[in-house]
Amino acid sequence: EADIYQTPRYLVIGTGKKITLECSQTMGHDKMYWYQQDPGMELHLIHYSYGVNSTEKGDLSSESTVSRIRTEHFPLTLESARPSHTSQYLCASSESDRIYGYTFGSGTRLTVV
Amino acid sequence: KNQVEQSPQSLIILEGKNCTLQCNYTVSPFSNLRWYKQDTGRGPVSLTIMTFSENTKSNGRYTATLDADTKQSSLHITASQLSDSASYICVVSDRGSTLGRLYFGRGTQLTVWP
């Protein structure tokens, strides 16, 4: 049973719409992450958070924004979706010990038409 | 240049056969290496995690090896099943930052045929 949940699983939306991808975890992990993954390609870190009120941009530049108001919740927002945002978005969380406890959600497949 | 390279890019085997997937990395300083299984349209699921001092670790029919000197790892799958069809991703973590940055390979796409 997954302890990290992403919704929606699939989303098809028109250009210019505002969208929020939800991510919640029940493990009490301090660190949370958002990755972007295109088919056949490696995961790229776009945002991460050390804890409440802490957010940082990752390696891959992204027009999305994130917030961390509660430990368990790490939503990602696109103010104006474009076709170039079409991708799979994966949320993950980890314990403070960076060796263990890295868990991924099932992902959100976003298609912008 | 990606610091984690996996081979082969894709592999097709018959059910019941064994296979070995390769991972070479240049990440330094090294902290740990993980193998993940990712089913199509799903998030990666951890199979094994190995630190510098470990050179083999098993999880059921999956056995991972690590040679930290040559910076190579392999994932051996024994008696493959149809459900093994997935992408297998090698992930290396460094210890140069408090974040413990992860470096991802592009994965090997394994297809098991009946």
Image: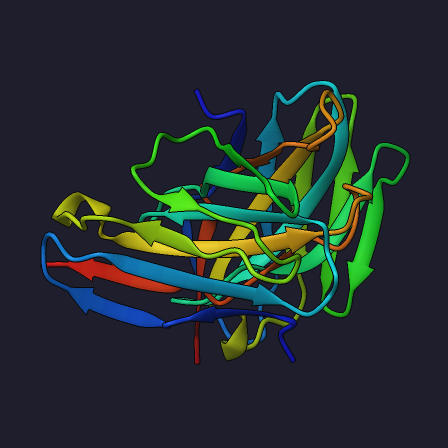
Specify the quadrant that holds the C terminus of chain A: bottom left
Which residue is pictured at 80% across the width and 59% down the height?
A: B58
Residue found 76% across the figure and 44% down from its top: B65
The mark total stands at: 0
Q: Is residue A39 visible?
A: no
The residue sitting at 55% across, 41% down in the picture is A48
Query: Height in image: B93 above or below B40?
Result: above
Residue A93 or residue A40, whichever sits in front:
A93
Q: Is residue A91 visible?
A: yes
| Residue located farthest toward the right when viewing the structure as drawn | B53
The spot of residue B86 in percent (x, y) is: 47, 64
> From the viewer's perspective, is residue B29 above or below residue B12?
above
**Which color scheme did the rendering employ for the protein?**
rainbow
Is the N terminus of chain A in the top left, top right, bottom left or bottom right quadrant?
bottom right
Taking the image as shown, residue B42 lies to the left or right of residue B54, namely: left
Could you say which is closer to the camera, residue B74 or residue A6?
A6
Dividing the picture into quadrants, the one containing residue A28 is bottom right
Residue A65 point in image, percent of width and height: 38, 43
Front residue of this view, candidates B63 and B3: B3
> Residue at point 68% right, 38% down?
B73
Instruction: Find residue A14 and report its horizontal and vertical position in percent.
Output: 10, 61
Identify the image quadrant of residue A62.
top left
The percent position of residue B29, horizontal first and vertical second, equals: 74, 19
